[in-house]
Amino acid sequence: MAEFLLSVSALEGNARVLRRVADASGAKVLIALKAFATTSALHYLRPYADGACASGLYEAQLAAEYLGGYIAVYSPAYTQDDLSHLLDFAHHIDFNSLPQWMRFRDLCLQHPRTLNGELQFGLRVNPCHSTGHTPLYDPCAPGSRLGVPLCDLHDADLTGITGLHLHTLCEQYTDDLISTIAALEKQAAPLLASSAIRYLNIGGGHWITKADYNRTALEELITRLQQRYNLQVFLEPGEAWCIHSGVLRAHVLDIFESLGHHHAILDVSVSAHMPDVLEMPYRPRIFCLVPPGVSNAMREQQPAVCLPGEHYAAAGANNELPYTYCLGAPTCLAGDVLGDFSFPRPLDIGDAIILDDMAQYTIVKTTHFNGVAHPSIALLLPDGSVRVVRSFSYHDFVDRLG
């Protein structure tokens, strides 16, 4: 059966890096649950995080139950019922538009937790400064619904607003953040410097735990912002907490040739279990398990999570290695394919195929589309043992359908 396998050691390694950045800069570092919310794994991240950021009531409730600490919430829109619940336990709530803030301002400002200083409110802003390369993930694209354009704040009544929130990056480095902050300061330095603004949330999308990320530059930027404007900076990375910490272990169900193309059908679906491969889109790194006695087929690269005693061969591009297959899913969607990958040996029915770096934006997005069996979720513990924390059945599929 297919399985998401998460390495506790790798998760803790990422967490230590983020904790060092927070301690060196004075920032508060939160876990973005929209990217990674596997509750059994959050236990291992909790000692390193200041709290979590949530995209609405359910994620906020999960944060309160499994993480504790500071809970920051942002949603493009709130219902009054959800907001009323959030007011009872969140620590800052950011609004997406001025009209929604004005609609709920009295409710928010009259709450006892606001009056005693436990709860603050902010606005997500749009610096109108695009740095990304994928329009689907660009909150600064023309006509974006995410955030208030900074030019709309100049004459606005911001009574009760004590924070600003921007999130413009996606898998990006410090240069893009620095240019974004420059755009923010150019348009809103007086607002940042006002006594009313007490926090700045610079969002996520920062590849802080990548080996080539310039963490010193990030720490210096945060330190400067806090000192210049006398405010608290929040970071809310998602992917950075779990990058290079998880794989999806799949298996070959069928192999056949059709009109000159060799196909291998796996027991996982791209659409249902790793949709960013289609949405971003991107090409994941793939490995095959090398049986004993043929380890000479190995290449230098290895997946992020390796089970003790196993050896792997990295797949190559189309026709790069002797045996090429189009890796596809067992669904009716014609485009539910990973693409063409080549291997150093022929694939066989039952072979294990390792899809690398499948912790972030996978488990949180999975569906039961087509009734394909859902991969289980397991933890690779530091002692090398594996603990399955969740298995899925026919009843999980049925229960979601009402």
Image (cartoon, rainbow, N blue to C red):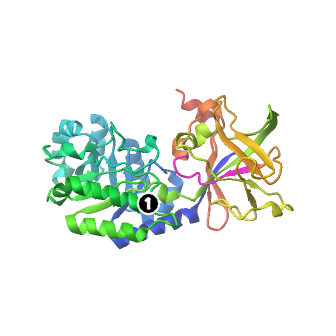
Q: Residue at x 59, y 37 (%)?
A: 271
Q: Residue at x 75, y 49 (%)?
A: 342
Looking at the image, which is closer to me, 81 or 197? Answer: 197
Q: Residue furthest right?
A: 293
Q: Looking at the picture, how far across and down is residue 375, in whole percent?
A: 64, 44
Residue in the image at 51% along x and 63% along y: 210
Q: Is residue 110 left or right of residue 92?
A: left
Q: Is residue 205 magenta?
A: no
| Element assignment for label 1 | loop
Q: Is residue 299 above or below residue 340?
A: below
User: In the image, what residue type sits under mark 1?
Assistant: Tyr
**Residue 355 on the magenta segment:** yes
Quadrant in which the N terminus appears: top right
User: Whole-percent x and y of residue 106?
Assistant: 15, 40
User: From the viewer's perspective, is residue 257 above or below residue 162?
Assistant: above
Q: Which residues, given as a range, are shown in magenta?
A: 352-362
